[in-house]
């Protein structure tokens, strides 16, 4: 066996006795929305096969319910459904016979989006749509049977194994925790009784599939809930699960309703792996760790520390299907790194029946629809603007074989991403800019920075097509006193180009307004870069691991000491338009720092006294030193208009096309689609 010079552990095989995983990189489970889509299994086959070709050792699919009451659409319990799943397994094994693929069996329990959902007790989750029906003995027996039957069906479909998810607030985990298991029979009461259901699921699945089939159990190693599982209970459960027949234990670190972020961009890389490491010391089977491990160097460090045997990377495999191959071949600078924004993946999953994709890789889950095929007729293209849409268009078009010149008036690429990367907790945006810089070099894009392209110049250079990605300009509201010295644009505030006083009003509570409030209220190191700061900010006790992993005391949040008021015209709750899986973290952080959030605001004027407003029609003066304007954006289309007058063909993309809300997801997707067709 050849030892990899950079990543000897990541690229070492793992022997399970009856089979071998070729390396330690796993694509973790993510529901994609394709499970319920038209032609979804054909599309999933292409999606998973592309990751298999990308070098991963094992794939765990998105969750598949074992019966109707367990989910909200797809399931696996019939031979007809087996035939659909076989499309996936055959595609993966054809792509690389060495890659293992396991199907996750997901019983959502009280979180299932249907009125027939079930649980050990009729305890409604605060994030659920329905109160579950409490299972009686016959109901429990049915669920146990359906788990085993689903696993047997997965085996028939050609999967190499299954993962049983016993965490996150889904059915199995609600048996484990006393607050959701109020039973007094053999399935409730003592922890020995509460864990009986989980152990019996594993025992029955193992009996149904035999010895030579991978069985992974996902355990809540730290569920981030007050009154969650104690460490001793986690150890007891893990050892019992191992004895019941699990080959691998995968560690998870939350319930979906837990008030602690575990997967958002403000979470430090590999923040929770030490918990996996502790569990690894008390079991004999291999353990998987996960959460915010997005680059091969991070994975190798975790393996070298002895904190895990396998590394699960779910969203990073959305961002770059070739991540593992690029690591093996020394092309780390070409990895399109997951920035944990959640905007096109988890926000879609938990926001309703929306298909998953990826902000930095819109091809994810569109492998049969969006492809960057070599062009049959190379064109000479000009792209004006090196923000997210311009970068996406330029790199895709150049990758396909077009000659591309990319202009930008600034001294660096990135556009609005150069603002985002300065916000504490959004440091991962540096990775996206590194990736695009490398793609420009690799695909031979002629990059002309510090160059303000005008219509006459572009017309004179003989381009076949011109793509206008000039972005946006901040909208300046028509307001008396808007030129007052205390008024600062959000760009100047973020770049530090103007002083900011101690008393601040922020006009506008969209994503930019929240970013500005985060920056101006922040003090000390970023929690995204310092695990100890992150733990204090969210009340996590990694050292002592109290019940649920949380201290139960008030989190320690450092503040700049500024008095900040975040203002919104709309009467809806402030921040309600933010992403579903991350918005609550931003609102909670700012609240803990004392940021006041006010809706229903009408702006009257700005003068020496401050910002004059009507709040729900009641006059109110905010006596502030600084007013930061985050009042929306306008598309920059002057170049497009000039080209139109000159009779030159031009195409608008990104913010220049639509600037109502800054949306990098939409901008990159639109630009990539257009560049795939040029």
Image (cartoon, helix red, strand yellow):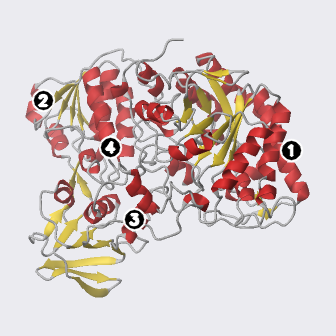
Q: Residues within 10 Å of mark 4 (few under 14, many from 20)?
A: many
Which disc, if any, is residue 532?
none
Can you identify the residue that label 1 sits on?
145
What residue is shown at x 65% (from left), y 32% (from top)?
A: 41
The secondary structure type at the circle numbered 2 is helix
What residue is shown at x 44% (from left), y 24% (from top)?
A: 7
As drawn, 187 above or below 213? below
Q: Is residue 248 visible?
A: yes
Marks 4 & 2, CB-CB < 8 Å contact: no
Distance Cα–Cα, label 1 vs label 4: 47 Å
Q: Residue furthest bottom?
A: 618
Can you identify the residue that label 2 sits on?
459
Q: Tell me which corner region of the image, top left, top right, bottom left or bottom right, holds residue 517.
A: bottom left
The secondary structure type at the circle numbered 3 is helix
Q: Nearer the viewer, mark 1 or mark 2?
A: 1
Q: Nearer the viewer, mark 1 or mark 3?
A: 3
Q: Quadrant of the N terminus?
A: top right
Instruction: In this rendered view, identify the residue nearer to me: 660 or 79.
Output: 79
Q: Residues within 10 Å of mark 3 (few under 14, many from 20)?
A: some
Q: Earlier in the sequence, mark 1 or mark 3?
A: 1
Instruction: In this rendered view, identify the residue nearer to me: 628 or 377.
Output: 628
Q: Position of residue 206 (x, y in %)?
A: 81, 35
Instruction: In this rendered view, identify the residue nearer to me: 3 or 119.
Output: 3
Q: Earlier in the sequence, mark 1 or mark 2?
A: 1
């Amino acid at each position: 066996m050849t030892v990899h010079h950079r990543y000897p552990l990541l690229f070492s095989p793992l022997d399970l006795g009856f089979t071998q995983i070729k390396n330690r990189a796993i694509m973790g489970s993510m529901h994609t929305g394709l499970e319920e889509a038209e032609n979804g299994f054909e599309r999933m086959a292409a999606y998973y096969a592309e990751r298999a070709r990308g070098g991963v050792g094992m794939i765990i699919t998105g969750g598949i319910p074992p019966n109707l009451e367990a989910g909200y659409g797809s399931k696996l319990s019939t031979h007809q459904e087996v035939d659909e799943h076989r499309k996936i397994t055959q595609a993966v094994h054809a792509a690389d016979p060495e890659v293992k693929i396991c199907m996750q069996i997901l019983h959502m329990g009280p979180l299932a989006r249907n009125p027939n959902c079930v649980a050990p007790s009729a305890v409604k989750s605060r994030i659920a749509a329905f109160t579950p029906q409490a299972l009686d003995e016959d109901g429990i027996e049915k669920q146990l049977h359906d788990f085993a039957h689903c696993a047997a069906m997965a085996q028939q479909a050609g999967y190499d194994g299954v993962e049983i998810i016993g965490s996150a607030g889904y059915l199995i985990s609600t048996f484990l925790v006393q607050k959701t298991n109020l039973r007094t029979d053999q399935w409730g009461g003592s922890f020995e009784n509460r864990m009986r259901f989980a152990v019996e699921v594993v025992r029955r699945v193992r009996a149904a599939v035999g010895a030579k089939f991978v069985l992974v159990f996902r355990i809540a190693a730290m569920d981030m809930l007050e009154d969650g599982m104690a460490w001793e209970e986690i150890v007891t459960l893990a050892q019992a699960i191992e004895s019941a027949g699990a080959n691998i234990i995968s560690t998870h670190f939350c319930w979906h309703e837990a008030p602690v972020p575990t997967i958002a961009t403000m979470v430090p890389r590999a923040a929770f792996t030490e918990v996996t490491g502790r569990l690894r010391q008390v079991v004999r089977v291999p353990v998987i760790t996960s959460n915010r491990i997005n680059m091969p160097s991070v994975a190798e460090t975790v393996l070298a520390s002895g904190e895990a045997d396998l590394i699960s990377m779910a969203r990073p495999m959305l961002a770059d299907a070739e991540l593992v191959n690029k690591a093996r071949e020394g092309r780390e600078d070409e990895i399109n790194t997951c920035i944990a924004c959640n905007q096109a993946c988890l926000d879609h999953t938990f926001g309703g029946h929306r298909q998953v994709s990826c902000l930095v890789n819109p091809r994810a889950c569109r492998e049969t629809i969006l492809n960057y095929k070599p062009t049959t007729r190379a064109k000479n293209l000009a792209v004006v603007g090196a923000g997210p849409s311009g970068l996406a268009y330029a790199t895709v078009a150049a990758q396909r074989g077009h000659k591309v010149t990319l202009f930008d008036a600034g001294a660096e690429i990135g556009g609005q991403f150069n603002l985002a990367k300065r916000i504490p907790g959004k440091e991962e945006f540096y990775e996206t800019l590194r990736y695009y810089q490398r793609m420009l070099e690799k695909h031979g894009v002629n990059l002309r920075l510090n160059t303000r392209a005008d219509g006459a110049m572009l017309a004179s250079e003989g381009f076949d097509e011109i793509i206008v990605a000039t972005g946006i300009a901040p909208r300046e509201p028509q307001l008396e006193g808007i030129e007052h010295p205390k008024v600062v644009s959000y760009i100047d505030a973020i770049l530090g180009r103007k002083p900011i006083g101690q008393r601040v009003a922020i006009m506008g509570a969209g994503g930019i307004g929240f970013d500005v409030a985060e920056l101006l209220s922040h003090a000390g190191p970023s929690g995204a870069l310092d695990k100890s700061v992150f733990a204090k900010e969210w009340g996590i006790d990694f050292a002592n691991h109290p019940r649920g992993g949380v201290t139960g005391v008030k989190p320690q949040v450092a503040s700049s000491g500024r008095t900040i008021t975040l203002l919104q015209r709309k009467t809806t709750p402030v921040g309600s338009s933010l992403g579903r899986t991350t918005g609550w973290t931003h609102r909670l952080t700012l609240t803990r720092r004392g940021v006041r959030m006010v809706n229903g605001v009408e702006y009257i004027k700005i003068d020496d006294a401050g910002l004059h407003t009507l709040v729900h029609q009641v006059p109110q003066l905010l006596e502030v030193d600084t007013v930061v304007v985050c009042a929306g954006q306008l598309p920059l289309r002057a170049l497009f208009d000039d080209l139109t007058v000159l009779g030159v063909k031009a195409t608008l993309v990104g913010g220049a096309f639509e600037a109502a809300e800054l949306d990098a997801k939409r901008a990159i997707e639109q630009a990539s689609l257009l560049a795939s067709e040029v």
